[in-house]
Image (cartoon, rainbow, N blue to C red):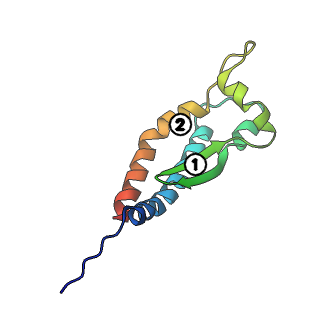
Amino acid sequence: MPEVSFVGSKALMARGMAAVRPAVVESAEAMSGQVNIRPTPRDTGTLLGSVHVSEVNVSGSEVTATVSTGGEASEYAFYVEGGTSKMAAQPYMAPALLEHEPIHKQMVEQAWKAAF
């Protein structure tokens, strides 16, 4: 008699996440590159040069990548993005993220479908 086995949802989720993780990393790297080609505030270039993917986490059904600034730019990046009482906001990260969102969704969907 034929034997039928069921692959549990945990195994399926793990397979999907294994496929999606590289797509999320690639997407985050592309998004950080968007910051560099957009009209971004430039004085010394330190802020632009510091944008990078700082961490990638897989937790259950979620894969997240953090795009951040590093080095000495970390001290003032937030104020450039959001402004202060003495300086107007010069958003550079949020516009790049919003512009990249549809590309990100497409990359993740393609990776998920390819896993199955």
Is the residue 34 above or below the residue 1 in the image? above
Foreground of the two, 79 or 30: 79
The location of residue 75, given as percent across then percent down, is: 79, 33
Residue visible at 72% across and 25% down in the picture:
79
Q: Amino acid at mark 2?
A: Leu
Residue 9, numbered label: none
Structural crowding at the residue carrying mark 2, measured as other residues with C-alpha within 10 Å and reported as few (<14), some (14–19) or many (≥20): some
Foreground of the two, 45 or 24: 24
Residue 2 appears left or right of 81: left
In the rendered structure, are the residues bearing label 2 and label 1 in contact, judged by CB atoms less than 8 Å apart? no
Residue 97, numbered label: 2
Task: Note whether residue 45 is visible.
Answer: no
User: Where, quadrant-wise, is the C terminus in this rendering?
Assistant: bottom left
Residue 65, numbered label: 1
Quadrant in the picture for residue 113: bottom left
Is the residue 94 above or below the residue 67 in the image? above
Inter-mark Cα distance, 2 to 1:
12 Å
Outermost residue, bottom direction? 1
